[in-house]
Amino acid sequence: MGSLTIENVQKSFGKVDVLKGIDLTVEDGEFVVFVGPSGCGKSTLLRVIAGLEDSSSGRVLIDGGDVSATPPAKRGIAMVFQTYALYPHLTVRDNMGLGLKQAGEAASEIDRRIGIASSMLSLEPYLKRRPAELSGGQRQRVAIGRAVVREPKLFLFDEPLSNLDAALRVNTRLEIAQLHRRLKATMIYVTHDQVEAMTLADKIVVLNAGRIEQVGKPMELYNAPANEFVAGFIGSPKMNFIDGGRLGETAKTIGVRPEHITVDPKKGSWKGTVVHAEHLGADTNLYLDCEKTGLITVRIFGVYDAEPGATLYATPDPTKTYRFDADRKAIK
Amino acid sequence: MSRATSSLPRSVAAHAILIVYTIIALFPVVLIIVNSFKSRAAIFRTPLMPPTGTTFDLVGYATVVNQGDFLLYFQNSIVVTVASLFFVLLFGAMAAFALSEYRFRGNTLMGLYLALGIMIPIRLGTVAILQMMVAGGLVNTLTALILVYTAQGLPLAVFILSEFMRGVSDDLKNAGRIDGLSEYTIFFRLVLPLVRPSMATVAVFTMIPIWNDLWFPLILAPSESTKTVTLGAQLFLGQFVTNWNAVLAALSLAILPVLVLYVIFSRQLIRGITSGAVK
C-alpha cells in the first residue's frame, strides 16, 4: 500500500515547459529523493503528485489508481513543507488533528493517533502551545507529526530542512530516516542538497531542466553516473572535468573526483601549483592549477600542509576516472 | 552627543519638521472644537482663544440636540459607513484572493480593470448612477448610498489587498488543501487573519471619505429620514445667516465616531499575528 507511478507527466506554465515528460515508478516502502538544481522542476513534480498542481498531460497513479482528477485531501498523501506551514491560530494538537477532523474521523481515533505521533516525535510537552511559541526545529517536527497522524500512503517532503540551521538539519535528517524505518511508509523527498539525498534515499532521482537525468541507488549514481550532469551534481567537492584532447584521450571529457586524485611533491602525472588550500581537519581541499588540465580540485583525507604557490604533482586513480562523449553521456 | 546612527542637529531638525506638520494638521480640528464651546460673539471676536468663564457657551450643542433630528443623522451615517466598509472589505478581499491565488486567463487584465476605479472618480458617473437609482426605486434610501460607496471603495481595496495576499505563504494554503479545507475555509480562517493589518489600512482609507461625503447624500438621499451628518450640518448653513455655533458643534460631534472606528482599526494595524505560521 503506497506505490506511485508517474506516466509521461508534462507541465507548462504558459510557454515555459517545467516538466518535459516524466516517467517514474516508486515501490511500496521506498524512500525516493528528487534532487536537482533550483528550477529543475522537482518541486513542481512533487506538487503534481500531491494534486496541488494539475499536470498539462500524463497520469499519476497511487496504488495503481489514477488520481489525476482527485483533490489533494482524497489522495491519501501528507506533505511537509519547507516553511512548516503550520496554522498560526491553532495549537500543536489542533494543527495535527485538523486533517483528520475534516475527514470525519472519530475524536477517540484522532486522540490515539496524535498520542502516537507526538510520542514518536517527542512533542508531548508542546501539545497545548501555538506555533509562535515553538522553535524552528519543533515547528518542523509538528509539521512532520501532522503528516504522520494522517497515516498516508505517501509522505511528501518539500525541502523540509532548508529553513533549519546546520546542527538541527542533521538531527532532523536523522529523525526522518528513523521515521521511515519505523513506519515503513513510502516517502518522496525533494531537496537541492545532494548530501541529504545521499544520506536518506533508497533511490535518487536526479532532475535537470524538467527531465530525469538518472534514477538509481545513491552508490550507483556515485560510482556509475550516466552523464556529465549527474557526475558533477553527485559528490562534494564537485568532480573535475578535463578536456579529453588536452590529455591525448579520444573521449570528449575526462572526469575524475577530487577524492580519487593523489598528490606528491616530487613526481606524478600532472604538474601544478597550489592556488588555494582549504583545511577542514578531516579533509584538506587543494585547488591546483595544472599545466595539462587547468584548475582542478583535490581532496586529501586528513591534514596536508600545502601553501599557495607550492608545486605539487597530481595523479588520478586510473580505475576511477570517467569518460564522457560529445553528447555528455558516460562511455562505459 | 553624536553617535553612529544619530546626531543631535539631525534629530532636532527631524522633530522640528514633524512638530510643525502636526500643528498644521491639527490646527483646524482644534479650532473647530475650541470654538464649538464658545458664544457666537466670542467666536468672531477672539476666534483663536480658548473658552473662558464669560465666553463659554454650550448653545451650539443645545441647538444641535434640540433642532433637527441629529441622532437619526448620526445613525444614518454610521449605518452607511459601517455597511459600506463591511462590503468593501468582504468583496475586496475575496476579489483580491481570487486575483492573487488562482491562475486563469485574463487574470492581469481583470486586476487592471478592477483597479481602474482608482484613476476614474466615481462622481463622473453621478448622472448615470442617479438614473439607475431612480429606475431601481432606490432614491432616498440608505441602500443607494451603501451601493455607491461600496463601488467607490472596492478598487483601492482590491489593489492593496491583492498585493498583500500575494505575500501570504503558498505552503500554508497548500497545507490547508491537503488537510481537506475548502477554499472558503482557507480564505476566511488562514488568509484573512494573516492580512488583518492590511485590511485595517484599507478600512481607514475607505472609511473617512465615506463619512465625510456630502455629494452623494445630497443627490441620492436628501430626504429627512436618510440624511447623513454632513448633510444635516448644512441645515445650519444658510444663504444669509449661518448658525456657526451649531455648525461647529455638529462638526465636533461628527469627529467622534470616526475617531472610535480609527482607534479600533489602528489596534489591528499594530497587532502582528503572522509570527510562527511560517519561518
Image (cartoon, grey):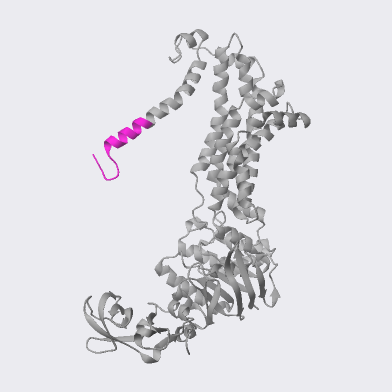
Residue A290 position (above or below residue A108): below
Most distant residue in the bottom direction = A319
Residue visible at 44% across and 16% down in the picture: B50
Q: Where is the N terminus of chain B found, in terms of image quarters?
A: top left
Q: Residue A214, position in %: x, y? A: 53, 80
Residue visible at 67% across and 73% down in the picture: A59
Given residues B131 and A92, the one toward you in this image is: B131
Residue visible at 41% across and 88% down in the picture: A250
Q: Residue A3, position in %: x, y? A: 64, 78
Magenta span has B14? yes
- State how many labels appear: 0
Q: Is residue B227 among the parts visible in the rendering?
A: no
- Which residues make up the magenta segment? B1-17
Q: Residue B105, position in %: x, y? A: 65, 55
Residue B279 position (above or below residue B272): below
Residue A235 position (above or below residue A132): below
Magenta span has B87? no
Given residues B90 and A17, the one toward you in this image is: A17
In terms of image quadrants, where is residue B127? top right
Q: Is residue B193 among the parts visible in the rendering?
A: yes
Q: Residue A196, position in %: x, y? A: 46, 74
Instruction: Left or right? Give the position of A249 relative to B82.
Output: left
Instruction: Left or right? Give the position of B14 relative to B109.
Output: left
Instruction: Left or right? Give the position of A219 relative to B75.
Output: left
Residue A252 position (above or below residue B196): below
Given residues A201 and A14, the one toward you in this image is: A14
In terms of image quadrants, where is residue B19? top left
Given residues A273 and A306, the one toward you in this image is: A273
